[in-house]
Image (cartoon, grey):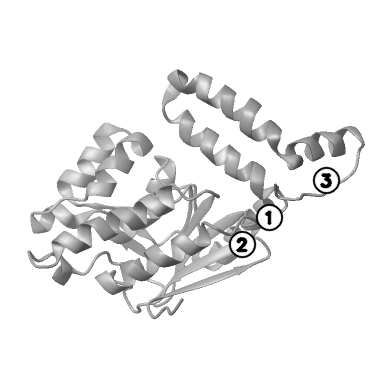
Amino acid sequence: MTLQFVDWQFSDGVGRLTLKRPPLNILNIAMLREMRDALEKAAHEESLRVLVVRAEGTLRVFSAGVDVADHTADKVGEMIPLVDRVCAALADFPAPTLAAVHGHALGGGCEVALCCDLIVAAEGANFGQPEIKLATVAPIASLRLPPLIGYRRAAEMLFTGDTIGAAEAARIGLINRAVPAGELDKTVDELVGKLTTLSAAALRVCKRAVRLGTGGWDNLPAVEKLYLDDLMSLDDAHEGLAAFMEKRAPVWKHK
């Protein structure tokens, strides 16, 4: 797989997808295609415990969003479905995903982060959907923001195009943590370290359960079935219980 605008690395249970179109990591059609292809490849790594999405370039910008030139009438028909496919691939990724946001995440860049399960950001980062200022809208953010931060806050962000800082984003539940810029890598590594001690197979079942949980109590039968049929068919589920009972460290097979 030849990649020019992103980098994909996988080792020791950790996948790392890095945006590489500095200084602003603006997402054009070619870059979105590469992201789609890399995510499709990553999804087949069964021993992957966590996928980290981060960006190169200036410390001030994670991604400034989708290239405005790709919003024109001759390109938008390809661009919007590509953004949707990339964001859906992140949201539906079988293992946990974590966005490490060191700078501003705007427009499509914000949507990429929103589609990750976990977000850790530097305190100087900002999040926003400025599309309305160009008389356009943010389809993915329109779906993701209301259940994350509530209708009214989501409506304000989407209607005004205003940005919010990392501290406020953490306060309202848009992101998990806002940390000093110098501690971002350490915080991400600590969180990744926790996940890499766990069973890849069990984490995948857990992610499916959490996604069902967003549907409320109506999904209780589906979560129960997931536990009894899918989780209890895993070697690791029985190993984890046996290791606890025998007071020893578990030995995961990741299946």
Find residue 179 and report its horizontal and vertical position in percent: 51, 57
Q: Amino acid at mark 2?
A: Val
Marks 2 & 3, CB-CB < 8 Å contact = no
Q: Amino acid at mark 1?
A: Thr
**Is residue 129 in view?**
yes
Q: Residue furthest right?
A: 246
Q: Which residue corresponds to mark 3?
A: 250
Q: Is residue 151 above or below residue 133?
A: above
Q: Which residue corresponds to mark 1?
A: 196
Marks 3 & 1, CB-CB < 8 Å contact = no
Q: Taking 32 as reference, is 177 left or right?
A: right
- Whole-angstrom CA distance, mark 2 to mark 3, is 19 Å
- Callout 1 secondary element: helix
**Is residue 101 in view?**
no
Q: Say which label, 2 or 1, has the lower sequence index.
A: 2
Marks 2 & 1, CB-CB < 8 Å contact = yes
Q: Amino acid at mark 3?
A: Pro
Q: Taking 216 as reference, is 45 left or right?
A: right
User: Which image quadrant is residue 83 in?
Assistant: bottom left
Find residue 137 and report its horizontal and vertical position in percent: 16, 50
- Callout 2 secondary element: strand
Find residue 212 and report its horizontal and vertical position in percent: 47, 31
Q: Is residue 50 above or below residue 16?
A: above
- Whole-angstrom CA distance, mark 3 to mark 1, is 13 Å
Q: Residue at x 37, y 70 (%)?
A: 34
Q: Say which label, 2 or 3, has the lower sequence index.
A: 2
The numbered mark at residue 14 is 2
